[in-house]
Every structure is written in C-alpha cells, then in structure tokens.
Image: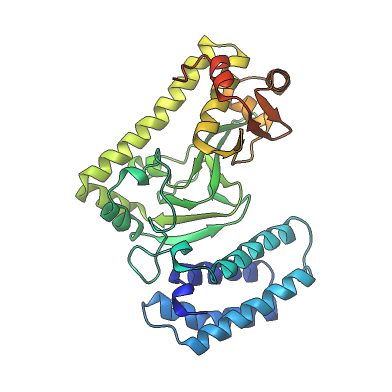
Amino acid sequence: MSESHFSADDIVLLYEVLERLQAESPDPVRAETLSALSCVRDAADHGEPVDSEAQQSALTALQRYLSLVNESSLGTAGARAMKRRALSAHVSAILQAAHKPDEHRRTSPQGGRGVGGGGRRPWPAKSVIASLKPDQCRALLALGHLRHFAAEDVLVHQGERTRHVFVLIDGVTKVTHSSRNGRRVLLAIRSRGDLIGELASLDGSPRIATVTATGLVSAVVIAHRDFEAFLAKNPEVSQAVSASIAGKFHSTTQRVIDYSAHDVPVRLARVLYQLYQDYGLRKGDRVELGIPITPPELASIIGASEVTVQKALADLRQRRIASTGYRTNAITSFAALAETADINDQ
C-alpha cells in the first residue's frame, strides 16, 4: 500500500479509536498496536514523510489486532463490548478504504493533522459549513482538533458551563432536554456540517440541552476564545453562524405554531416530512430515514402522547404513505405525506 493511500486523517482516527478502547479496557495486543501506529501518527502529525517500513509495521499490527477482536471479546461484555466492536468495525472500514484509489479517499484541507473538508463529499446544502467559502471552511476547521465518539457518547451535557463549539464532520447526534419531572424531549437532530454549542459559546449561558451521538461521530472541537476571535475577524462567517442560530429559533417557533394550529396527525406528518427532506436516503421508490428515531421521540418533538403518535403512524401505514416499525424507516409517497402535512410540495 502506497503512502498516499494512508492519509493523515486516517492515522489520527485509527490511533484515537484504539486509544479510546485501550482506556476502557487495557490489552497488551492493543498496546503493541498503538506503539506501532504512534510512529506513523507522529510523523503525519508533524507533516513529515512516513517511513514505508514503519507504515507497513503499523498496518500489520492493526490487522493482527483486528483478527483477534473478531475471535474474542477481549475481556468485557455487554454494552461496552458492543461499543468496542462498533469502533473496531470502523477501523476495519478505514483499512479497507486505504486500498481504494485516491479519488475515494479523504483529504486534509491543510495537510498534516487535518480534517476532511471538501475532498470527501459535499457538505449538506442546509448546513452552516456549506454556506462558507472553501478558505473560510478550512480556516475554521484548522482552529480545533478532531475527536471521535461512539454511539451513546455524550458530546455536551445539559446544564454544564462549558463554551467550546463542535463542528460535526461525520455522523448524527440527537439534541435532548430533560425537565425536572424527568421527561426527556427530543429537540433536534444535528448532522454533518452543523454546529453544536455555538449559542453557549457566544453568550456564556449554561448548556440548554444534552447532545448524544446516535452512532459513530467525528467532530472538530474549537475553544470558545478561538471561535469568538475568528468570528470577529471574519464577518461573513459570523453572519452565517448568526443565520444558523436564527434558523434554529425559527424551527422552534414553527413547532410552537404547529402545536397550536394543527392536530397530531398533521404535526407528525410535518415533522416526518422535514426529517426525510433533511436526512432521507432514496432507495428506489422509497426514501429511508438515515437516522434512528423512535415513536416516543417523535411524540416528544410534536408534544403528543406516544399512543396518539402510534395511531397516526398506523394510519400512514394503512394509507401506504409510510412503512414503519419501532423506528420510522421509510416514506413511499412524498406527495401524499406533504398533503397530509398541509404543505405545498410544488
């Protein structure tokens, strides 16, 4: 495998994934793998050429480690072991991608320890990052460092007084709020190209919600002072961030209006329509939702009981508008869904 097929981004990701696993459950084979990988990672981190012998040694160590992961649980069971297997599968996917042509590989915007800016795939059109110019995007991402989270990892806890900002590079998160009576409400979904925590960063208020990874998530973490200084020097970026914050408030306001103006079936249809527009994956004549979401979460979004939401979902299934299970998974007619939602789908 040539050096160009093992990017700096991959090296950092592989090392940090294994480092996370090692912190959870120390293992001698994993320790050897980290040692072999560190030479390659350190060179890439400083923008230096990667020695081919060290690179081959790292790859051999990784393949040995992964073969052992597939053969044993490596010491723990239950949810923690499931998390390890998911992260290890991510490592396997990266190793497989390392053998693909360069045009399918991730690229770093500035070389060295970078983040896949635009070389991987386009940013979602409605995201903050998509609204920035390429040089603005590179400069913003260069302010922070890349972190990786497994499913159910919490990026931000409600009530904490931290002020750093996340730029989501990959994966999907759920934004939830827990009331004093213990009720948990799903406020929003955030994905690739979105910002997390910009409001607390700018006004210093406690975090108003908890943000949790729904699966493997990669994000650039930016200190609030760096973020604030960057916005002061870049008015166009500041305007884009302000527009993003305004958009989030607009979405919340629209939900309040919907609650007052529409009954549960219409409110549900409107939320589903927006979710599928933003996160849907077209497969033939179906559009599947690319994020896991449950009826209780849908109920919390629209301010209804789970029983009422289940009845509304059953009606959508009966009318062949949606195909749903415990996790709503596909829309078969967007036109019919828009009609149900009282939305002009022209």
Q: Is residue 196 visible?
A: no
x 39%, y 59%: residue: 119
Left or right: residue 146 compared with residue 203:
right
Count of numbered labels shown in the rendering: 0
Residue 272: where, in percent of width, then height?
A: 57, 27
Tell me the residue at 37%/78% (across/down).
46
Q: Nearer the viewer, residue 216 or 288?
A: 288
Colouring scheme, one of rainbow, by chain, secondary structure, one colour: rainbow
Q: Position of residue 308 (x, y in %)?
A: 70, 18
Q: Nearer the viewer, residue 168 or 288?
A: 288
| 98 vs 117: above or below | below
Q: Is residue 324 visible?
A: yes
Residue 234 vs 31, above or below: the answer is above
**144 versus 174 height, above or below:** below
Quadrant housing residue 65 = bottom right
Q: Position of residue 275 (x, y in %)?
A: 54, 32
Closer to us: 280 or 172: 280
Can you give x and y, in whole percent of width and height, for residue 224 in the image? Answer: 35, 51
Quadrant for the C terminus, please. Answer: top left
Q: Quadrant of residue 175?
A: top right
Nearest the eye: 344 or 46: 344
Residue shown at the point (42%, 77%) measured from the top left? 44
Residue at the extreme bottom: 53
- Side of 37 relative to 310 (left or right): left
Tell me: residue 49, above or below residue 218: below
Place residue 205 in its image quadrant.
top left
Give the left or right position of residue 178, taking residue 197 as reference.
right
